[in-house]
Amino acid sequence: MDYTACHVVVTGAASGIGLATAHAAAERGAQVIALDRDASALQRMQAKFSERAWPLTTLPVDLADEAAIRDVVARLATLSPKIDLLVNSAGIVSRGLFEDTALADWQRVLSVNLTGSFLCLQQMVPLLRAGTGRAVVNVASLAAKRVSHTGGASYTAAKAGVLGLTRHAAFELAAHGIRVNAVCPGPVLTAMTLNATTQAARQQVAEMVPLGEWSTPEDVAHAILFLGSPLARMITGTTLDIDGGLSLVTGTSYAAYRAAREK
């Protein structure tokens, strides 16, 4: 996949799947525009990209703030005449049980994970129409189709909303030649995951996955770039699961299934 001369906007670009996507796009020749609320992390990202002579524009923004999104898109329009690929990767979680979830926490998660994706896409449509790629990939989650064991009800609801947003945006924006798709990662081995889990817990999760291991951020990034490329020119309004087959497993772990078959 060649992204030479393509302008790729990534939200949540300073860490996790967003950072891996920005790296993968830059490696393939893209001009990356990175949006993230963590200004310090964006500075570190800028330094790493500079070491490799990769072009990068960084724009700090809080995706829970509508005015901030409008301002950053207006600034983006002065820096770039077009967008070829928009990757809505920003996301947060609010851990806790359903009955203990505060309304403020619920609203914050939906504001970033769902409304932020909606506003970024809506405000960037003119720039996408000016591009040649005209592609959008929203990062949802396997939790959108099942439940989040760690992210809480707000995360599950927000990511399910991202899938609805993806379908409807694909339906309407097809008139402009803009394709909109989503990826649904299963367990992904990010720095946040490593800090929040034990080796034993990670092994237990891996045993539930038919392919036997966690996905990496790079696995997800490569799928995103495929959906954003001309190779996927007739794919829109769809969802690509990147979960090692976990969505195929119901009611038991894959390890238990294999053990039963081997008896």
Image (spheres, rainbow, N blue to C red):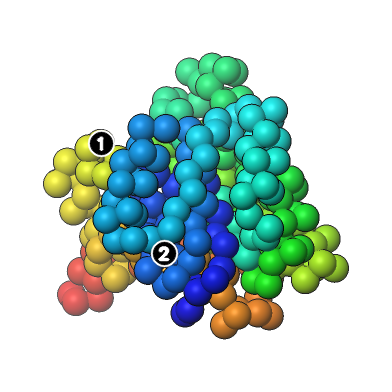
Residue 220 appears in view? no
Residue 236 image point, x, y percent: 68, 70
Q: Count the marks.
A: 2
Is there CB contact under 8 Å for labels 1 and 2?
Answer: no
Q: Residue at image x 56%, y 50%?
A: 88
The amino acid type of the residue labelled 1 equals: Ala
The Cα atoms of the two marked residues, 1 and 2, are separated by 29 Å
Residue 240 image point, x, y percent: 53, 67
Residue that mark 2 sits on: 26
Image quadrant where residue 197 sits: top left
Q: Residue at image x 52%, y 40%?
A: 59
Residue that mark 1 sits on: 196
Crowd tier of the residue under label 1, counting other residues whose Cα lies within 10 Å: few below 14, some 14–19, many 20 or above: few
- Asked if 189 appears above or below 103 in the picture, the reply is below
Residue 89 image point, x, y percent: 51, 49
Residue in front for this viewpoint, 12 or 258: 12
| Outermost residue, left side | 199
Residue 119 image point, x, y percent: 70, 41
Crowd tier of the residue under label 2, counting other residues whose Cα lies within 10 Å: few below 14, some 14–19, many 20 or above: many
